[in-house]
Structures are given as structure tokens and as C-alpha cells.
Image: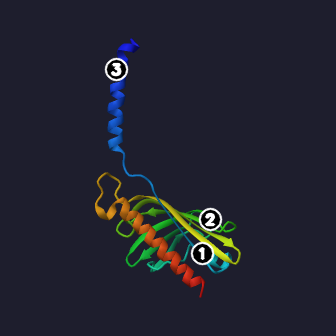
């Protein structure tokens, strides 16, 4: 009986495998950027770890705390660039390790062409200098196959990379004054 069914099972497995491969959506994308700053880690962390302020991030025009303590898990902020905004929530805050992990909970692909964005920013002491690493995992802004150019993988990676580089360059300039 099994011998008679084996060709049918193999054929069905092949059909399922082909349809599953074609149905595969976007892959999780990752970006990681770092900068060395000629300033003590505590000073840099004081700025980077302030969830209620992004004064060091050039495109941000204002940050409004929506709920919670800006040094505790669950705190929520709304980050504005002009009239556009995204809402972010702290997932982990560890001042001893100088690490902040957060995620976007209310997306705006017109502002940032990504979905399911989660990020970690960390400051590490390196003698009297600091190394700041900012990394993220996310999906492109368009979840289905054949995304428009403004919401594809390349655009999502470029947007996050550009944001991180601009932010870290400005942070370095501010901290080294």
C-alpha cells in the first residue's frame, strides 16, 4: 500500500514545496552602524539613553512622551519629523550596560519605509572614548511580493543606514565639542 502511495506523496510534496517557495514574502533585514567618540561613555550614554529626547538625531523635530517612565520598559514616545510621526516603546532599558532596546509600535511608512522595526543602541567604554553601536532588524515597508520602489528592501536599508549614519555623526560632533 505504501509503495502505491509513495509516488503520490512525492508529487504532492513537490507541489507544496513549489507553492511555498513562491509564496515566501520578504526577509528580515538588518542594519548595524558604529562610531567611536572621543568622550567618556557616561557622558555619551546620558544623551543616547534619554528616551524622552532625540536632540542628537538631526531629522527629529520633537519627542513627546505618551506614557511611562523614559528609563523603564514599556515607556512610549512619539517621535516627530515635521508633521509625520512614529510611536516607539522601550522593550529593554539597562543603564548599567548602557543599552536601550525599543520597537516601533505605530508605523508610518511615509516617514520610515519599514515595518516590524526593532532597534538596540549601546554605548561601550573604550578607555576615555566611547563606541556607540546602533543596530536594527526590520522588514521593508511593503509586506507583499513585488513592492513599489519606495517600499522595497533597498529603500528600507538605505533609509535606516542613512538615519543611523546621520545620527551617529551628529552625536559624535555634539559629544566632542
Secondary structure beneath label 1 = strand
Taking the spot 70% from the left edge, 78% from the top edge, the residue there is 128
Q: Are marks 3 and 1 in contact (CB under 8 Å)?
A: no
Is residue 177 toward the left or the right of residue 81 in the image? right
Q: Is residue 140 left or right of residue 43?
A: left
Q: CA distance from mark 3 to mark 1?
A: 61 Å
Relative placement, left or right, of 61 versus 68 is left
Q: Which residue is mark 2?
A: 93
> Residue 89 appears at what percent x and percent y?
52, 64
At label 2, counting other C-alpha atoms closer than 10 Å, the crowd grade (few under 14, some 14-19, many 20 or more) is many
Structure colour scheme: rainbow
Q: Is residue 86 left or right of residue 43?
A: left
Q: Position of residue 90 (x, y in %)?
A: 56, 64
Query: Are there few (<14), some (14-19), or many (20+) residues within 10 Å of tag 1?
Result: some
Q: Quadrant of residue 43?
A: bottom right
Label 2 secondary element: strand
Total numbered labels? 3
Q: Which mark is residue 36?
A: 1
Name the front one of labels 3 and 2: 3
Asked if labels 1 and 2 touch by Cβ distance under 8 angstroms, the answer is no
Where residue 29 appears, x then y in whole percent? 44, 57
Q: Earlier in the sequence, mark 3 or mark 2?
A: 3
**CA distance for labels 2 and 1:** 22 Å
- Quarter of the image where the N terminus is located: top left
Coordinates of residue 155 in the picture (x, y in percent): 36, 64
The residue that disc 3 covers is: 7
Q: Earlier in the sequence, mark 3 or mark 1?
A: 3
**Crowding at label 3, few (<14), some or many (≥20) Cα neighbours within 10 Å?**
few
Q: Quadrant of the C terminus?
A: bottom right
| Picture layout, residue 7 above or below residue 65 | above
Amino acid at each position: 500500500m505504501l509503495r502505491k502511495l509513495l509516488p503520490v506523496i512525492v508529487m504532492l510534496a513537490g507541489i507544496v514545496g513549489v507553492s511555498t517557495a513562491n509564496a515566501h514574502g520578504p526577509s528580515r533585514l538588518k542594519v548595524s552602524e558604529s562610531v567611536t567618540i572621543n568622550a567618556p561613555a557616561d557622558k555619551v550614554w546620558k544623551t543616547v539613553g534619554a528616551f524622552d529626547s532625540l536632540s542628537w538625531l538631526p531629522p527629529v523635530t520633537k519627542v513627546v512622551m505618551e506614557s511611562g517612565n523614559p528609563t523603564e520598559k514599556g515607556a512610549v514616545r512619539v517621535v516627530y519629523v515635521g508633521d509625520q510621526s512614529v510611536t516607539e516603546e522601550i522593550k529593554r532599558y539597562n543603564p548599567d550596560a548602557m543599552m536601550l532596546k525599543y520597537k516601533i509600535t505605530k508605523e508610518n511608512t511615509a516617514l520610515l519605509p519599514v515595518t516590524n522595526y526593532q532597534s538596540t543602541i549601546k554605548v561601550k567604554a573604550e578607555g576615555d572614548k566611547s563606541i556607540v553601536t546602533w543596530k536594527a532588524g526590520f522588514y521593508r515597508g511593503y509586506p507583499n511580493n513585488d513592492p513599489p520602489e519606495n517600499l522595497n528592501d533597498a529603500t528600507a536599508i538605505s533609509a535606516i543606514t542613512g538615519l543611523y549614519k546621520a545620527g551617529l555623526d551628529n552625536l559624535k560632533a555634539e559629544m566632542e565639542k
